[in-house]
C-alpha cells in the first residue's frame, strides 16, 4: 500500500489519475450533456444570423459576435462549477499529497477536449445550416481550420476563466451568481458590437470576446465586404410620393437594373472599413497570442488560489 502511494506521488502521475476521474465523470455522470447543448445553441444562432455571415459587413459583424457569444457561453458552462462543487474533496486530497498544479493541469486537458468537441460541433452545425465560410485563409491552407482555431481558443479561454472563478469562489451558488455578470461584461466590452468611447475602449483589451471577435472579423475579410445599411435606409423611403410620383422607387429600380446598386454597396463598405479587422495574418496571430496569454494567466491564478485551500475555514 505504501509502495503504491509513493508511486503516484509525482506531479505527472497525479495528472493522469485526476484525468481518468474526469473522463469517468464525463461518461457516467452525464458531463457529456454539454456537447448536445452546444449543438442546440449553435443551431439557433446560425439559423438566425447565418444567412449574411461573411457576406456583408453587417452580417459579418453580427454573425461573428454571435459566434463569440457561443464560444463564451460554452466555455463558461463547461467549468464554472467543476472545482467549487468538489472543494471539500480537493481540500482533503491536497492534505494527502495531491499537487494543485497537477489537479489544474488535468482539468485543463479535460476542458481542452470538451472545447475541441464543441468547436467541431459548432462548425458542423454552421455548415449544416448553410453558412458560407470564407474562401481565403490567413494562417493555414484551410479557412475553416483557421476559423476553427479561433473558435477553439475563444471557447477554451472562456472555459479557463470560468475554471479560475470556480477555484476562487467556495460554493456553486456563488459561481452561478458571478457567471451572468462575467458573461454580460464580456459581451458589452467585446469592442465590436456596442459603441464604446474613451476609457471603456481600453477595457476591451482585457476581454476574451474582443480578441475572438477581432480574429473572426479579420478571417472573414470584413473590410472587403459590402455594406447594406445605406441601401436599406433608402429602401424605406421607396413609397414616398412627390407630386404623385415616387422618385426613390424609380431610382431603386434604375440602380438595380443598371448595376448601380452593387457599386453603392461596395462604396458604402469602403467608407466603413475598420483597420482593426484588417485581412492580415499578423492581426489574427496577435489575437491568438492574447487568448493564449489569458489562458496561462487564468490557470496560474487558479493554482495560486487553490494552494491556500487548506486555510479555508468555511
Image (spheres, helix red, strand yellow):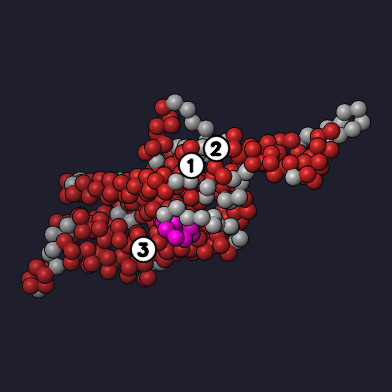
Q: Identify whether 2 is placed above or below 218.
A: below
Say which residue label 1 marks. Answer: 277
Say which residue label 3 marks. Answer: 113
- Residue, x 30% and y 61% (percent of image)? 109
Q: Position of residue 105 (x, y in %)?
A: 25, 58
Residue 22 visible here: yes
Cβ atoms under marks 2 and 1 closer than 8 Å: yes
Does residue 128 appear left or right of residue 22 in this picture?
right
Q: Position of residue 162 (x, y in %)?
A: 36, 49
Is 147 a magenta residue?
yes
Pick whichever, 14 or 209, lies toward us. 209
Q: CA distance from mark 3 to mark 1?
A: 29 Å
**Which badge, 3 or 1, comes first in the chain's sequence?**
3
Say which residue label 2 marks. Answer: 273
Q: Which image quadrant for residue 182? A: top left
The numbered mark at residue 141 is none
Pick whichever, 162 or 92, lies toward us. 162
Does residue 53 appear left or right of residue 186 in this picture?
right
Cβ atoms under marks 2 and 3 closer than 8 Å: no
- Residue, x 60% and y 61% (percent of image)? 129
Question: Which residues lie in the magenta part?
Answer: 140-149
Q: Nearer the viewer, mark 3 or mark 1?
A: 1
Amino acid at each position: 500500500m505504501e509502495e503504491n502511494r509513493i508511486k503516484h506521488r509525482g506531479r505527472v502521475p497525479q495528472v493522469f489519475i485526476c484525468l481518468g476521474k474526469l473522463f469517468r465523470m464525463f461518461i457516467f455522470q452525464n458531463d457529456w450533456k454539454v456537447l448536445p447543448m452546444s449543438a442546440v445553441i449553435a443551431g439557433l444562432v446560425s439559423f438566425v444570423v447565418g444567412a449574411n455571415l461573411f457576406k456583408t459587413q453587417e452580417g459579418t459583424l453580427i454573425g461573428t459576435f454571435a459566434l463569440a457569444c457561443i464560444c463564451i457561453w460554452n466555455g463558461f458552462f463547461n467549468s464554472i462549477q467543476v472545482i467549487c462543487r468538489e472543494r471539500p474533496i480537493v481540500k482533503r486530497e491536497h492534505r494527502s499529497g495531491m499537487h494543485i498544479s497537477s489537479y489544474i493541469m488535468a482539468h485543463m486537458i479535460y476542458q481542452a477536449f470538451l472545447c475541441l468537441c464543441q468547436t467541431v460541433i459548432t462548425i458542423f452545425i454552421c455548415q449544416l445550416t448553410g453558412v458560407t465560410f470564407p474562401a481565403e485563409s490567413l494562417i493555414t491552407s484551410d479557412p475553416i481550420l483557421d476559423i476553427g482555431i479561433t473558435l477553439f481558443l475563444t471557447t477554451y479561454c472562456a472555459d479557463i476563466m470560468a475554471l479560475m472563478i470556480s477555484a476562487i469562489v467556495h460554493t456553486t451558488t456563488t459561481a452561478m451568481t458571478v457567471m451572468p455578470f462575467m458573461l454580460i461584461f464580456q459581451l458589452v466590452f467585446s469592442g465590436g458590437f456596442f459603441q464604446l468611447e474613451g476609457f471603456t475602449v481600453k477595457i476591451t483589451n482585457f476581454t476574451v470576446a474582443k480578441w475572438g471577435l477581432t480574429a473572426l472579423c479579420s478571417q472573414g475579410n470584413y473590410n472587403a465586404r459590402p455594406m447594406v445599411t445605406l441601401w436599406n435606409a433608402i429602401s424605406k423611403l421607396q413609397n414616398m410620393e412627390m407630386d404623385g410620383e415616387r422618385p426613390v422607387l424609380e431610382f431603386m429600380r434604375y440602380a438595380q437594373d443598371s448595376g448601380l446598386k452593387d457599386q453603392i454597396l461596395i462604396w458604402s463598405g469602403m467608407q466603413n472599413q475598420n483597420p482593426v479587422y484588417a485581412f492580415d495574418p499578423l492581426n489574427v496571430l496577435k489575437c491568438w497570442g492574447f487568448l493564449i496569454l489569458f489562458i496561462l494567466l487564468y490557470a496560474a491564478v487558479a493554482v495560486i488560489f487553490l494552494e491556500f485551500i487548506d486555510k479555508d475555514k468555511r
